[in-house]
Image: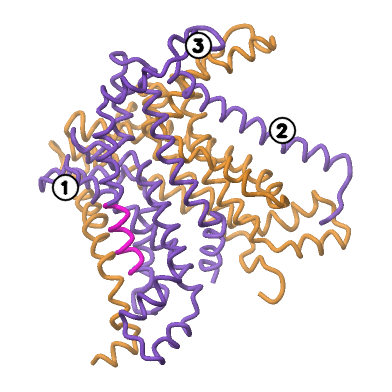
Chain colours: A orange, B purple
Amino acid sequence: MRLRLAAHGIDGTTLLVLPALVALLTLFIYPFVYGIAVSLAPKVGPFYSNYQRFFAEPFLRETIGNTLALAVPTTLLDLLIAVPIAFRVRLMRNQRLLTTILVLPVTLGTVLIAQGLLTYLGPQGWFNRTLLALHLIGAPLKLTNNYWGVFASLVITGFPFTFLLTLSYVSGIDVVLEQAAATLGARARARFVRIFLPLLAPGLAVTFCLSFVQAFAVFPSAVLLGAPAGSTHVISIAAYQAAFEQYDASLGSAIAMIMGAVQLIMVLGVLGARSLFYRGPVGGTKG
Amino acid sequence: MIGDRSIGSKLWSTAVWAVIILFVVNLLAVIATVVIDSLATRWLGTWLPAGFTLHWYRDAWDEFQLSDVLIVTFEAVAAVVALSGLLGVAAAYALARRDFPGKRAVTLMFLLPLLVPPLTYGIPMATLLYRIGLGGTLSGVVLANLVPAIPFVVLVMIPFIEQIDPRVEAAARVFGASTTQLFVRVLVPLLMPGVLAALLLVMVRTIAMFELTFLTAGADSQTLVVALYYAVFASGVRASQEIDVMAVVYMVTTLIWLLLALRFINPTQIVARTKAEAAR
């Protein structure tokens, strides 16, 4: 019996996976299923009435749009900054210092960034003062307690992660490929478009998904820096308010599930598009 | 290196550096505003505050019971790190060394918590925890934080373990090492750098994990992030300088651990190895 199990790869060592598996089953899968069940048992009406209500009420329905309007542009902007910087850092001999500086925002925490941005971008903050002093603007820009405050905060918090992932994908591409292309006379632009972009696309898709997951869950900064009742009334605020301020666990769970579903659709969409690109080794020969 | 000295490429590299500098300068300015404000006597409508003082640090320490909050934070984080380390490393070892039916499903299950926003599973989880009486307690906070921590340890450790030649273990076996000896003398020393790196990153992530702690913490089980959030949310009563003091304390706390983590690992390597694994 023991041998037969071992032939299938099950022995004492395999059992080491069990504790973690049990922990996740009880702490993640079970609550998740429970959440779906709760969301289908509303206070009043038929089983689907929570979902119906979400899509019928504009104030709730619009949270999806509000969240996407924050998460997609910030993720794209982070990627857009991260790619050229990663290409530059790749060539540097002393990458560690710059990498550390760029990863610094990880340590700041949403609240520090929120506090800092409220002062820095506020009407009397350094940002507006500098622009005024340079005569670039006539009156202070309103950048806090609205969409832009949250936008700035998301860009800052999301960047380290996006950058690290991009850098690792970029440095995973063998330099030999670039040198070969250069030897054959390809200019920098052509090398990027013809060699790097196709090789990088799958990695960028994954990076986009993982960064998007983080940006999509935006919660504290949308409250602190945004207009939580207006343009930054994001879906996580709606879910939280339903569950813990109106004490409607059923509606809260329903909104949480919708949030998960929307995100899953985005991620699957992006990963599906990834399959349009080249997939295979990015190393040189002798891999 | 490839010599490319056209005007276009020079312009391009200048532009890239400009973006880097712009980003870093703005970032440092944001940090500086918080640090300066935490030291300021009065700062209204001028470039720099009227004067500097340290008394906000003393006030904030008393008023927010920062020592209590820090103790709770460290208790919670230590528990999460220890538990996720034990469970995660064991699971990663099994996943890296054995091939068993259902392995794909198990791997997917370790990936899911990292792909679903914390609030999505956090809300039903918190509801459940409150129902069984663990909501609002330190144990509840620890349990909730294990959900993203365990998968994270597993995913970071798998490539580290795969890197170790199984023949080393086989050799130890041949020379008569028992399982315990094999573990203590061979595996632990070889895995230590990886384990340390994974645990330090879990530590930074757990200190920063807002949503799950926010949903499960009670009045006396708040960690630093959550206490900080409530302080800002209920502001008006408190001087903004005191909040900034807390934010600075928070930053310093995480910064120490992150710098320590960066001493042990090159962060990009982890992802690169993981990617090589995923590509196979």
Q: Which residues are magenta?
A: B79-90
Q: Earlier in the sequence, mark 3 or mark 2?
A: 2
Image-quadrant location for residue A47: top left
User: Residue tagged by mark 2?
Assistant: B18
Is B84 situated left or right of A180 in this image?
left
Q: Are marks 1 and 2 on the same chain?
A: yes
Quadrant (top left/top right/bottom left/bottom right) for the N terminus of chain A: bottom left
Please state the chain letter of the residue tagged with numbered disc 3 in the rendered image: B
Q: Earlier in the sequence, mark 3 or mark 1?
A: 3
Frontmost residue, A112 versus A47: A112
Q: Residue at x 36, y 19 (%)?
A: B56
Q: In this rendering, which labeled residue sits more in front, label 1 or label 2?
A: 2
Frontmost residue, A163 versus A206: A163
Residue B128: mark: 1
Disc 1 marks which amino acid? Leu
Please state the chain letter of the residue tagged with numbered disc 1 in the rendered image: B
Let me know if residue B106 is in the magenta part: no
Q: Residue at x 33, y 29 (%)?
A: B228
